[in-house]
Amino acid sequence: MPKEENAISNVEPEDEKISVPKKEKKPEKKSSGNGFVLFLLLLVVGASGGASYYFWEQLQKQTDELQQQQQSILNLQKQLKKTVADFSDNIAISTKNTTQLENLSEQIRQTETISQQAIEVVNRNQRDWALAEIDYLLRIAHQRIAVASDIAGAIAALKGADARIEQLGDLSLFKIRKQLAKDIANLNAIHQADVNGISLALDQAITYLPELPFKSVKDEIKVQFTEEKANVIEDDTFVGSVLEAVKQIGDIKIHQRSIKAASSADQQNSIEQLLRTYLLGARLAALRFDQVQFLHEINQAGEIVRLHYDESDNRIQQLQKTLLDYSALQLSPDLPELTKAWAMLQKEMKGPSSKTENSVAIEAQSKKTQAVSSDIKSEKNNQGAE
């Protein structure tokens, strides 16, 4: 039985195999519908994948473009920084060039001045040289009067200018000679003290001060007695008769003033130093042409000599005479102005008659240098505007 069952079981599958094709005829339509659906699904999936790839590709492109733009921005920033740095360097270079141009302009102006002076010196004729010499002498005369109060030096300079005009023989300068003669006469009429001689004499007196003799007490009493005896006035009053009787008694003497003679070495040293101070002050005042201070110092020195030194000595008498003469001196007289002749000469030198053919060349040279200076200034202005 089991074998039969097995046989049956084995047979049944064969029947099933045979009958299966017959049963599967209807499901063929379903498989075709499923394929279409599958095709649609594949198509949708493909489209979705294609769209996704497209969008991914676009995203990648946008990302790349964004990165490129960022890189471009970075490059532009670098270029901007470099441009700013270059601009700063250009400004520094422009400033340096401006400074150099200014220095060059200054050098050109100096060169222009020197060249014009050189051209004027080279192109001077005999008359120009003579006028330049006269101008120099007149300037010296003015300086000797205005600065040093040297009348003799001013007169010598004016006489030299007058002699040079005479040698030149130019009649157009006659008015200048006339003014020079007037200035020389005015200076000759002024009596000016010899300041250098006064200074040397005072120095000599100061040197010999320790050797000068002082008054003694006996000399002072003798002088006072002589003065009182010479000035006796007849007096009929009782007091006058008493005084006269007392004076006639023996050796009794009446002195109307105190004795001021220096009696000790310390007093003599103090008086000598005081006199030395006054003489030195007078010397300095003379060198400064200070009339008031000079007279004060001289009078004080003369008073000290009169009171404390022996007037019978020849050296004291000479010193007193010297101080008396100095007290009458005029150190700072009114000095005339010596500018009229110089002003007349300047007009003559700048007048049309003094121009020569070489002066035209000088003017042309000055115009050229002015044109160069203007070109430099315009170039500098253009650089500043840039």
Image (spheres, grey):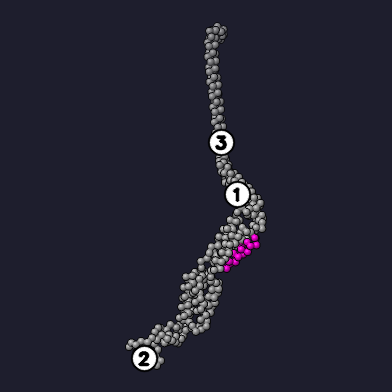
Give the alpha-carbon distance from disc 3 to disc 2, as whole Å. 134 Å
Q: Quadrant of residue 227?
A: bottom left
Residue at the location (53% across, 62% down)?
337
Closer to the camera: disc 3 or disc 2?
2
Q: Quadrant of residue 36?
A: top right
Would you say residue 331 is visible in this rendering?
A: yes
The numbered dot on residue 105 is 1
Closer to the camera: disc 3 or disc 1?
1
Q: Which residue is mark 2?
A: 245
Q: Is residue 167 magenta?
A: yes
Kind of element beneath mark 2:
helix
> Identity of the amino acid at label 2?
Ala
Q: Is residue 160 magenta?
A: yes
Q: Which residues are magenta?
A: 151-169
Residue at the location (56% across, 30% down)?
64
Q: Magenta region's main secondary structure?
A: helix
Q: Quadrant of residue 201?
A: bottom right
Kind of element beneath mark 3:
helix
- Residue 151 pos. (x, y %): 56, 67
Residue situated in front as seen by the camera: 370 or 3: 370
Q: Which residue is mark 3?
A: 76
- Residue 300 pos. (x, y %): 46, 76
**23 in relation to 88, above or below:** above
Residue situated in front as seen by the camera: 114 or 353: 353
Give the mark nearest the N terminus, 3 or 1: 3
* Other-residue count near label 3 (Cα within 10 Å), few / some / many at <14 / 14–19 / ≥20: few
